[in-house]
Image (cartoon, grey):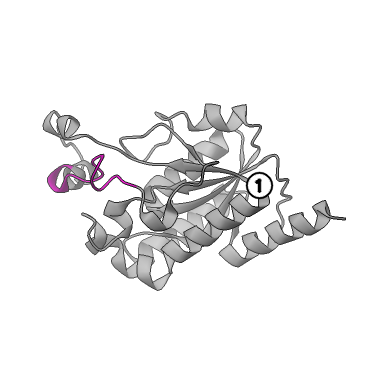
Amino acid sequence: MNTQLKSETTGLVLVDPQVDLLTPNGGAWDLFREQVVSRQIIDRLASLRDAADREGIAMFYSRIEITDEMYDGMTARTPLQRLFHDRRLLVPGRGAEIIPELEPTPQTVLFKSRQGPSPSPSDMFPRLRKQGIETVVIAGVVANLCVDSHVREAVDNGFNVVVVKDAIATTSEEAYEATLNNFALLATEVVTTKEFLDALQSLEAVSHV
């Protein structure tokens, strides 16, 4: 990993670690099951969370919540909106809940919830700036929608952005590979889970010298 990490200026952002997207009982599991299982997304996200917590790296969760009342008043204008509306995805108290395997730690900051892929309606960027974050490490789902939006907007807002490529998933391998091609141009760096964890270990070793 080439990006220089500093514990006080690095933040880990997990995007949408929620029931509807990552569990067999979730409303969109049929769309993401193959990649979530084959890429061991939950285990990798948990390893990132645990390492960040252990090394004192600031940790943030970005998530979608859409209430039944919002759905009742929604006019679906795009295929994505229709999918959300028809399946009633990511409703608080149901599919919007954080999965147990990725339960936030006491130090985890939950951004204000969103209603779509973009992080801008949340307080993500003010919160990152308030904590002095300069480098944002991003993982989660959905790679070519929410993760992509977070990467693009974080770069546009002046942050260094590192994408953990084997800790993101989408609906197909073709969509996944196309998204990685975009990240190769958009992100500061694209790394594996192991490369990021090794960088954290090196950070710890330096701090003890």
Give the magenta-colored segment's residue range.
Answer: 85-97
- Residue 83: where, in percent of width, then height? 18, 48
- Residue 123: where, in percent of width, then height? 46, 28
Q: Which residue sits at x=29%, y=38%?
A: 65
Horizontal side of 12 relative to 171 (left or right) equals right
Queried whether the magenta region covers residue 88, the answer comes back as yes
Please identify the quadrant where the C terminus is shown.
bottom right
Residue indicated by mark 1:
56
Horizontal side of 203 relative to 94 (left or right) equals right
**Residue sitting farthest toward the right:** 209
- Which of the two residues, 169 or 12, is positioned nearer the viewer here? 12
- Residue 167: where, in percent of width, then height? 48, 61
Q: Which residue sits at x=41%, y=31%?
A: 112
- Which of the two residues, 93 or 9, is positioned nearer the viewer here? 93
> Can the viewer see residue 189?
no
Measured along the vertical axis of the image, is residue 20 above or below residue 160?
Answer: below
